[in-house]
Image (cartoon, rainbow, N blue to C red):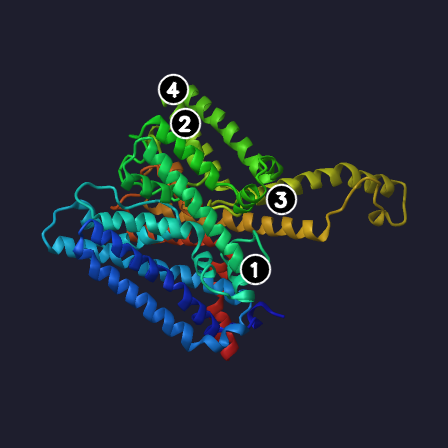
Amino acid sequence: MSLFDQKIHWKSIWSQTGLLLHVPAAMAAVSLIICVIYQEWFALIPLISVAVFGFGVGQLLYRLFLKEENNAHLWDAMIIAANGWLMCSILAAVPFFWIATERLYAGVISDNLVIFSHPINALFEAFSGYTSTGLTMLQKTGPFPNTLYWWRSFLEWTGGLGLVVFILSLTHLNKMGFQLYYAEARTEQMSNNITQTAHWMWAIYVFYTCIAIFLFWLFGMTPWEAINHAFTTLSTGGFTLGHESFANFSPLIQGTAIFMMILASMSFLVHFRLIRDKKWEILLKSQQTRLLIFFLLGGWLIVVGLNYWNETKIQWMSSFFDWTSALTTCGFSSTKLSTFSPMTKLFLIMGMFVGGATGSTCGGIKLRRLIYLLGGVMLRLKTLTQKKEKQITDHYRSTKDPLNSEPPGVDLPKTEQSERLYTAGVLFFLWTFSLLIGWFLILKWTPSGQALDALFEVTSAMSNVGLTSGLLTPEFSSFGKCIFMLMMWIGRLEIIPAIILLLSIPMTLKQKD
């Protein structure tokens, strides 16, 4: 069957997209509590409007096309995920723009409010929040509502686990639920029931968030700071309440953040088995966890060494913190990255590109795929040194059919192994190609001599990290910001759903002809 012969069930797609619109609606309703606590009554109407619109349109779409739900297949699920993340991000931008505009109209003087009175900046912040990226336009001084600080943190916390996981925990979608779960770049299961899997993930997520809140508060943060930073740590998001990120916090708080970032970069399946079986050796049985620990320890030594070698006078604790933040794709920083040498920046780029474990809240290509690719390299080397040598020898001995003879001791890849290597290879290619295209486009607005900074920003966006070299500011080109939003979006979905969404339009037009 041709690619363009794949049938697209648009009614089912819009029905499930309607379900996803309930997520920002529910978030807006919950956020009304913050308005009341801080008596920011000006935020009531914007949040109520988002809640009513999200619930209203979501219910309309869901119920209007409900009968078509069972016709959906995996391609439809991919389109639902890609389309849902777009629509939810657009809706989540409304409070930023509306509240900022209202405050400026009321006579409040604030550079930050001026920034978010521009729709592109509001949309950028929403995309960065939901994709748990952490790149921000909040870089100026002046009053900023606590409701919007909370909204930023809440977006990252919800988006870190996933919009689909949120919906699955409240519904019983059965087959469609598994398809949507896979479409949102997740495969780990804690139960044969997808709803129970979602419940377990939320339980673990909330449990670790509460631990982070307590530890941050215990070591000196205010309750407000502890809640917001716990939200953005467990989601590996990176938004903070200050311009200096974690630079002004004590070493104890920074150490706590490092510990929680590492927990967040581990697979939920590992956490589930650890909690259920209460056996610490489970951590070391996981290939991803072992590789994560190796990369963390090795990376810490390399970054400290590079900073010492280049005489940048950066403290070892800052080196530990920033490398952990890069590898776990969290996006916190303890020092200005402009002080790092080009070698250190490039090494951080490598960490951001890889990311944490599959089944975590991290971005990047993920450790599991790196393991598959490294396994493929080893398999290739093994076949070259044993199988190929035998083929060449047999050829010169005039063997009748040398290509069909296999030497003993060589295990050809099984079907599942081949599929894993193929999938990892395709994503690695798409990720690298998309990264290079994004870098190429962003160079248009990059000052001379800052090409490495442009690559740093693009990698940070696509891997949903949030670390910045200082290139991306509110004054950056609006078109350039749109490219960054696109990179964040495709990175969060791991590219394939975004491609399928783009292909769905010509596919639908062809089917109508």
Q: Is residue 18 above or below residue 336?
A: below
**For marks 2 and 3 on the same chain, the one whose residue lies earlier in the sequence:** 2
Question: What residue is pinned by disc 4?
Answer: 311
Residue type, mark 1 in image: Asn
The image shows residue 455, relative to residue 318, as above or below, that is below
Looking at the picture, how far across and down is residue 122, in whole percent? 27, 54
Q: CA distance from mark 3 to mark 1?
A: 27 Å
Residue carrying label 1: 193
Residue 236 percent coordinates (x, y): 41, 43
Query: For the residues carrying marks 3 and 1, which lies nearer the camera in this image?
Result: 1
For badge 3, the amino acid type reads Tyr
Q: CA distance from mark 1 to mark 4?
A: 55 Å
Question: Is 347 above or below relative to 273?
Answer: above
Residue at mark 2: 319
Q: Are marks 4 and 3 in contact (CB under 8 Å)?
A: no
Q: Residues within 10 Å of mark 2 (few under 14, many from 20)?
A: many
